[in-house]
Image (spheres, rainbow, N blue to C red):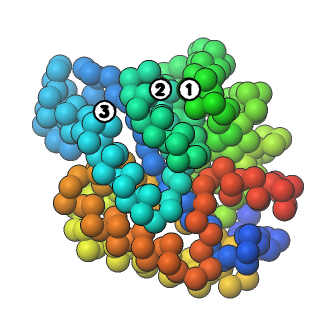
Amino acid sequence: MRKNELYDYSPITERPQITWPGGARVAFYVGLNVEHFWLGKPSTSINEGTAGLTPDPLNHGWRDYGPRVGIWRMIEVFDRHGIRPSALLNSDVAVEYPQIIEAGKARDWAWVAHGKTNSLLQAEVENEERRYLTEVVETIEKATGGRPRGWMGPALSETFQTPALLAELGLDYVLDWTADDQPYPLNQAGVISVPYTLELNDLGLFTAHSISGPDFVQIVKDQLDQLYADSANSGRVMSLALHPFVTGQAFRTKYLDQALEYVVDHPGVWNTTSDDIAAHFMATTGGA
């Protein structure tokens, strides 16, 4: 057992007021998982019955649909609603799918470092983590033209050293600790946590819980409505986590469109990125 020394307990009812630009009450961003998977290593699967096979055409092909087809369908929806996603980017994507990088650069996406590949978790590189993180960050910087400011580990994984090493590399926020509806400081100088979500996340909703498209739209509406009500005295963050091999499926497109329309047309919503949320929070609160 280990005491949580990464961040302190802070009830949301006992904090200084957070204000968002333009008097907005809810800061909204899309966390778009732009990922690469190794062929031959088990990973996120839609059918566990074949997940241990090498190769595993069923599950690898499902995942590979994302960069080949799904993300391009989603980009059309994002463009329609003025969404600049926070691209949670495996650095291998820069090598394997450069067309996605170019599409994101043309649209001024925010780039969040998301490890090298989603087939490699952070604990697996603990003995060489500084070198590994440096390679990931520098690869993304070279490909996108800007150094990432944020981090989310593959499968939201970290080691106890990850925040300190990220700070050394100039990153100032992480998405891994999904413990809040507001940004909060870590006990690592200069690093904060920005809310991400495992609940409002297509991977869990559609694959683990088997919800329908209309259910997805209603869940997004309910999340925003409650966060808006909660934000009467202090701002909140709403993240929507999406994967191109899940929501990029053809039969889900119209429901993504409906959900985003409700959010971006809702009064008091700041349609933004995780980068801008982190920057505004740190500028207006000092990260405290």
- Circle 2 Cα neighbour tier, 10 Å, few/some/many (<14 / 14–19 / ≥20): many
Answer above or below: position of 236 versus 82: below
Return the residue at label 3: 43
In-image side of 223 versus 6 (left or right) = left
Q: Amino acid at mark 1?
A: Ala
Q: In whole angstroms, how far apart are the C-alphas of marks 2 and 3?
A: 20 Å
Indicate the secondary structure of the residue bearing disc 1: helix
Answer above or below: position of 150 versus 53: below
Which badge, 1 or 2, is on the more N-terminal residue? 2
Return the residue at label 1: 143
Mark seen at residue 171: none
Q: In whole angstroms, how far apart are the C-alphas of marks 1 and 2?
A: 6 Å
Image marks 3 and 1: residues in contact by CB distance under 8 Å: no
The residue lying toward the viewer, choosing from 154 and 146, is: 146
Relative image position of residue 100 (x, y in whole percent): 42, 36
Which badge, 3 or 1, is on the more N-terminal residue? 3
Indicate the secondary structure of the residue bearing disc 2: helix
Q: In whole angstroms, how far apart are the C-alphas of marks 3 and 1?
A: 25 Å
Image marks 1 and 2: residues in contact by CB distance under 8 Å: yes
Relative image position of residue 266 (x, y in whole percent): 52, 80
Locate the N terminus and report the quarter of the image it occupies: top right
Return the residue at label 2: 94
- Circle 3 Cα neighbour tier, 10 Å, few/some/many (<14 / 14–19 / ≥20): some
Name the residue: 27% across, 36% down: 68
Relative image position of residue 225 (x, y in whole percent): 50, 82
Relative image position of residue 193 (x, y in whole percent): 67, 51
Q: Amino acid at mark 2?
A: Ala
